[in-house]
Amino acid sequence: MRLMKSAILLALFVGTSLLAQTAAPKAPAPAAKPKGPVIPADAQWHDVTTWGVEGRGWGDQERLRWFDRLPAKAEKTVTPAVWGLSRDSAGMMVRFKTDAKAIYTRYDLSKANLALPAMPAMPATGVSGIDLYARDEKGQWKWVTCTKPASQHVEAVMISDLAPGEHEFAAYLPLYNGIEKLEIGVPAGTKFEGLAPREKPIVFYGTSITHGANASRPGMVHTAILGRHLDRPVINIGFSGNGKMDAAVGDLINELDPAVIVIDCLPNMGPADVTAKCVPLVKQLRSKHATTPIILVEDRRFTNSWITPAKAKFHDDNHAALKAAYDQLKGEKVANLHYIGGDALYGTDAEGSNDASHGTDLGFLRQAEIFEPVLRAALR
């Protein structure tokens, strides 16, 4: 009997406790504290469209979106794939000066995919980030910070606690996403000056490698590195999988006023295509740019081609086709033509790529080191 009473009392105690737990309202969770610096409510915001970005060619021709790389009319002349890829902001860069001790940004991305499933080795910082550089006391560009986007709308303190004094900044736009709107912010009461785009850009026409795959951040593409090293504006018309020496793209390049034209399309072409299209494209460009330097670039060797004979043969044949086109053009007295070999563009130790084809940051740096002396000679 005593055992039965004990069991009943225990059951009543457990039931009452469970009822109390169910009925009692839960205390509200404490609000999450913001991590890191917060943008002040009185921040000064500056719309970059009011002074312009470098890498946005074709003047004030109509665009469906302000940060598109090609003008709206190109939709009718280039392939649908090129048109779609041209709406990424790859290669665009905005410059400004400020004495602010903090830099803010807010921008809207056109695509919800902040990273690309097709390029799993490329992070969201490269696909959708804004990458900030500044000149040091010697006038050299050095990296400062990069946004880490987590949604289509990005609003962030890019950097704070900056050294006092006025600095010149360069912010590189996303490589594989588009921009709907972009603003740069600084604390209230600080000096800010947007710097207009410079003239006579280096124009790079190429493939996904020119487009920027697989750079960890927008400023690490070889085109951007070269722009900083040479202190020149750059126009990037790399189209992932679709850089094929197309005449329609040549027509658009002929509307620009470039300092140098770099043709780097071989990774998307085979020997027969190179033979058929290279000479006509160079002559097409020469029809409008009689003395502008033109640089032809061989494709980079797949970093595992040393152990895959079919890939090695593909590169051998492609290189031979481009060299034959170059020799033909030189034989026809086409002046101011330059050539970059592809064998060592990623280095010779097989460490310049993480998927055999596209560059890591190391691969992009190695490319820039080989491009730079050729570009310097052409610019002279």
Image (cartoon, grey):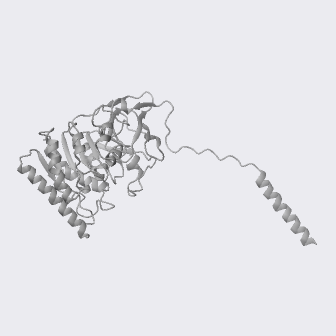
- Relative to 33, residue 120 above or below: below
Q: Quadrant of residue 131?
A: top left
| Residue at screen point 42% across, 45% down | 147
Residue 295 visible in the current orientation: yes
Where residue 200 appears, x then y in whole percent? 21, 36
Locate the N terminus by quadrant: bottom right
Report x, y in % for residue 376: 16, 45
Q: Residue 75: where, in percent of width, then height?
A: 32, 41
Query: Looking at this view, is 162 or 1 the one in front?
Result: 1
Residue visible at 23% across and 52% down in the picture: 265
Residue shown at the point (20%, 48%) measured from the top left: 263
Work out whether residue 306 can be spotted. no
Q: Which residue is drawn at 52% across and 45% down?
A: 35
**Coordinates of residue 198 in the picture (x, y in percent):** 25, 34
Q: Against 73, is 243 above or below?
A: below
Reply above or below: 362 against 333.
below
Q: Count of labels shown? A: 0
